[in-house]
Every structure is written in structure tokens, then in C-alpha cells.
Amino acid sequence: MQFNWKIGGEAGFGIMTSGLAFAKIATRSGYLIFDYTEYPSLIRGGHNTYEVLVSDEVVKSPKWEIDLLVCLNNDTYKLHSDRLTDKSMLIYDPHVFVPEIGIKIPITFGKIKRDEKIDQMMMNTIAVGASIGILGGDLSIFEEILHQQFDRKGKEVVNFNLKLAKIGYDEALKNNIKPLSILKKKDIIDPQMVITGNEAFALGAMVADCRYYAAYPMTPASTVLSILASWQYKNKMVVRHIEDEISAVNTALGASYAGVRSSVGSSGGGFALMVEGLSYAGIAEIPLVVLLAMRSGPATGMPTWTEQGDLLFAVHAGHGEFPKIVLTPGDPEEMIALTLKAFDLADIYQTPVILITDKFLSESHSSLSKKLEDAALEKHKIDRGKIVNDTKETPYLRYLDTKDGVSPMLIPGKKGTYYQANSYEHIEDSHTTEDLKERVKQVDKRSKKNTTYLKNHFELPKIIGDLNTAEIVFVSFGSMKGPIVDAMKLIKTKSAYIHFTHVYPLAEELVQQIFARCVGKRMILVENNSTAQFGQLLRMQTGIIFKEKLLKYDGRPIWPEEILLYVDDNTRSVVEEKNDTKIKAKVLSEDFRKKEKEIMDKLVAEMSVE
């Protein structure tokens, strides 16, 4: 079973709050979810949406067809009618408009608003109540969520919201619609968290013992700052909403030099300001974890939309040559695991580690087993490498040339022992130099870290499916994991997926060995950018070339159905029609493409600069 619920309305009127509440209701009813939200860079006005895919099985991406559309204004219907079918249900106000397609469920929002003397923001509570009624859900679960949201505001606020939810619930059932069993409560054997990529990073950073986090708010990385700020006193962490990204990276490097694990987070333009600091970290060999949450660029671009356009920028960030590690999680589970690993790697190799995410992963919620994740977090043991609080070396050589390229890093404070950690080239004892032999010696020393990392900590891509029997092999990195994995369930042709999470540096021969198994198969590179950046990186590092590329760069993630139709258009394979899927080629027809452009043009026109 898969059921796609979507709500839309004007920005500033609680769309995000109601969407998250619905996702939690579904999870607490015993189902798995994936949600996806879209919004322009506006505080008020514009058009916000939130969709939740409810399923009996694990889902990692949105579904194209909408099963229940909650229209809090006419724009919601106009902008999303292409995703409706005759079997789609619509909640709407009959005094505002009447839809031409689907199963109509009128709710007199305007009349309720006047009768109850409430503002527009409270319409979403009515809409969620109505949705629960239609889908056979338990209103008491919504009651629990309302208590969690509003108890701090007093009993009257909670009770009034409960009243509105019940009004919506009753209004929906007056339409002689037999309630479905989509949200029928089930016994919960494995409790699930409803978690975003940003929340997963924050959780991983806390467990990894990060003690300093600095950032200037920038979508889609901003929520990490607010999440960690809410935890900082309980977990003895310093979290700074700082004046700019230059200060963020430099203060984080100062904290790391002083001995605590440190991190910064930003998006494209903010990360650009941090690049000089990355080079400083590279030559001074100071650990740092950077969260780079990509959005549509260049410049301000489309600040609240998704893209994978900064991969090569991250790989080459910084002037001069120095080791760095780039990791690209594909879902919240991988985000937690790779965040834990990133802090270890930063310490072990005393270098910047960049975790790349994007708006799609950073802000979408998905279900994650609480039992499994708790067990993984409890098992994690922190590895600080050669970072020490004491040394018997006399003299202490901060940049000692070692076999693995990593020198013991002494935390400042040992009596009688001093060293420099500035941005200049240096000799082993840290004094600055411009001597040609010492320069070569230190460059070679730092470069040895790459060899050590590739030998000890690099992980080959995960292979999903059977590479030996597959006729089609998808290749990608990061957040495209969800759409590809879900698309593979729809494709009749045997397929496999090579999913990269450790993208730089790459172990050339080992990666080549994997792709040698794909000779004679159809390989498709899937990326959310216009220039196939990961394909370029693979070619540069391994010599592998892709003839087929499925690229998308309109601000949206790639839908599983788009991958399905790409494969079908190119192989004429038969689309597998599952009872709960009903994929049709018309979904991504030319008419849809034109509609997408119209919607995009309208949203861009409404956007303000962030």
C-alpha cells in the first residue's frame, strides 16, 4: 500500500506544521513515510506545499500521483491538477472553487472561519482533522501531537485546536464518503523516528562529541543551527549564530586547535566564504567537519530549491593542494553513520571533512527505526587518532614527517611546550619556511594522508541489487539514492545500483574493478545537476565514461517515475503495473513539461532574495 497525501496553501499559514503533523500521525499509526516540501523564498505569500507518502514498506522518495489533495486555496488545485486522476480525492472550499477532476470532498473552510472567529492559519488544523476522518485514522493521535505542540501555551489553546480538528473530522464524514483504512492504527513492533537529513546530522554531531558549531543561517542548512542550539545547554555544546561564514569557519578552527571537535554548516554562497579557511585548515592540519547543504545556484539562484550542483566545488575547494575528504550520504540513516565517521576522520587525518547534502535530503522527513539507530549510536566509539594532551617528545615536532602522513597533534596547554599553527609553510617543529626542500617534504607528508585514507577508511560504493544479472546499472551519489531505489521497484528489466557515499578521494583500481563487471550492460548516470559533475569526477579519478546521463536541474528532485520513463523510452521495456502504483506514461508528457515551466516561472517571479 502507498498513499500520497498533499496539502497546499499560501506561505505563512501553517502548511509545514500541518504536513509534519500528518507525517507523525501516519508513523504513530504504524506506517512508514517519506515527505517532501516545496516553498518559495518568502515569509508571506507565494505557494507552499507539503506531501507525505504513507506506506506499508520502506519508501525513500516522493510519489508522483496524488491520492488526496488538500486545497487551502484555488492555486493548490491549479498548480497540481496534472498529478491528479479520477480516483484522487480533493478537500476544498466549495465557496472558493469546484474542482473538475477527482472525488470531491467539500469543506466549508470560510464559513467555519467566520463562525469560530479564527484566522487563516488555523485552517490547516481543520484540514488535518478532515484527512484523518477520510483515511480512517485515530483522532486521539492528533490530540497527542497537539498537546506536544501547544501545552506550553495553555490548556485553552490545546482544547480550541482539538475542537477545530473535530470539526474538520465531522465535516469530512458528512459527505457520505466511506472512510478508507489508510491510517487504520496498527500494532507498532518497531518504533520509527520521523527525521530529516539535517536532524540526522545534528544527532550524529552530538553523539560524535562535537562541542562547537558555528553557522550563519542559510537555507537549507539553517535548521541544524536551531536544532543544536536547542540542545546545547543539555549537551555542553557551544552553538553560535555568528555574524558571517568567514567568522564561522575561523572560530571553529580556533576551537578545534584548542582541542574540541568543531563543525560549521552552510550552503553554496556561505560555503564559498569558508574556502580560505579550508586552505588554512589544510596547511595547519587542523580537524574540521563541514556540512555543505546544496541548493540551486549559482549566486542566490533559487535558495529554497534543490540541486546537486556543488560537488566539484567541494572537491576542489581551497587554493593550493592539500588532503580533504568528501562524503555524500543518501538518506538519514547514512547521514548519521557518516557524520559519526566524519568527526573521526577529521581527527585521524587532521584535515577538513566535507559532508554533502542537499535541500531534498536536508529537509525531507523519512521513517527510521529507533531501535536500530539507538543500537548503532550506542556501539559507536570515538577515535581521535593521534590527537594527544601530553607528549614526551623533546623537542616536540608538530609536523613530524611520518610514514602515514599524520603527525601527533598536541592540544595546547602542556607546560614548556609551544608550537605555531599559522597559515605559512613550515618545517617539522612548526617554524615557518620558504626552503624548497622543506616545502617538498611537507607537501609530500600531507599527501601521504590520501594513501593512508584510501587504504584504511575509504569505502567502496554500495551495490543495491544483483550486478551480475542486471541488464541496467544506475550510478549516482548522495540523495539520488531514494528515487533510484524506488524506481528499481517499478522497472521490470533487471537492474542494479552503484551508490557512492565516499566520493573523494577515490580508490582508482578498486572502483575500476566494480565497473569492469558492468561491461556489456546499460549504465545510466543519474544526477540532480546539468553537467554530470559526479560523472566528471569519476572520469577524472578513474577514467570511467558514461554514455547515458539522466540529469535534472529545475529545482526539483528526480522522481522515481521519471527514471522509469527514461528507461522505458530508451529500451521500450514493459512498465510493471502494480495495484498500488498505476504508473502511466502520460505522467511526464510534454503537457506536464509545459505545466512545470509555467509553475516554475510563476514561483521565480514571486521569489524575493534571501
Image: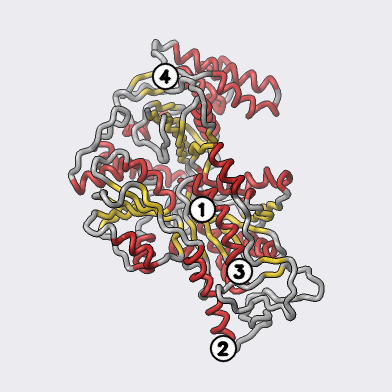
Height in image: 163 above or below 260?
above
Looking at the rendered image, the disc whose residue lies closer to the viewer, 1 or 3, is: 3
Q: Which mark is residue 293?
A: 1
State the SS at label 2.
helix
Q: CA distance from mark 4 to mark 1?
A: 38 Å
N-term-proximal mark, 3 vs 4: 4
Name the residue beneath numbered marker 3.
281
> The N terminus is located in which quarter?
top left
Name the residue beneath numbered marker 4.
181
Q: Give the residue type that dot 1 points to.
A: Ala
From this viewpoint, is residue 528 visible?
A: no
N-term-proximal mark, 1 vs 2: 1
Give yes or no for contact between labels 1 and 3 (Cβ–Cβ under 8 Å): no
Q: Is residue 126 left or right of residue 150?
A: left
Q: Give the residue type that dot 2 points to.
A: Lys
User: Percent position (x, y) of residue 152?
Assistant: 70, 29
Q: Is residue 449 left or right of residue 160?
A: left
| Residue under the point 34% across and 66% down | 539
Looking at the rendered image, the disc whose residue lies closer to the viewer, 1 or 2, is: 2
N-term-proximal mark, 4 vs 1: 4
Height in image: 129 above or below 498?
above
Q: CA distance from mark 3 to mark 4?
A: 56 Å
| Residue under the point 65% across and 81% down | 428
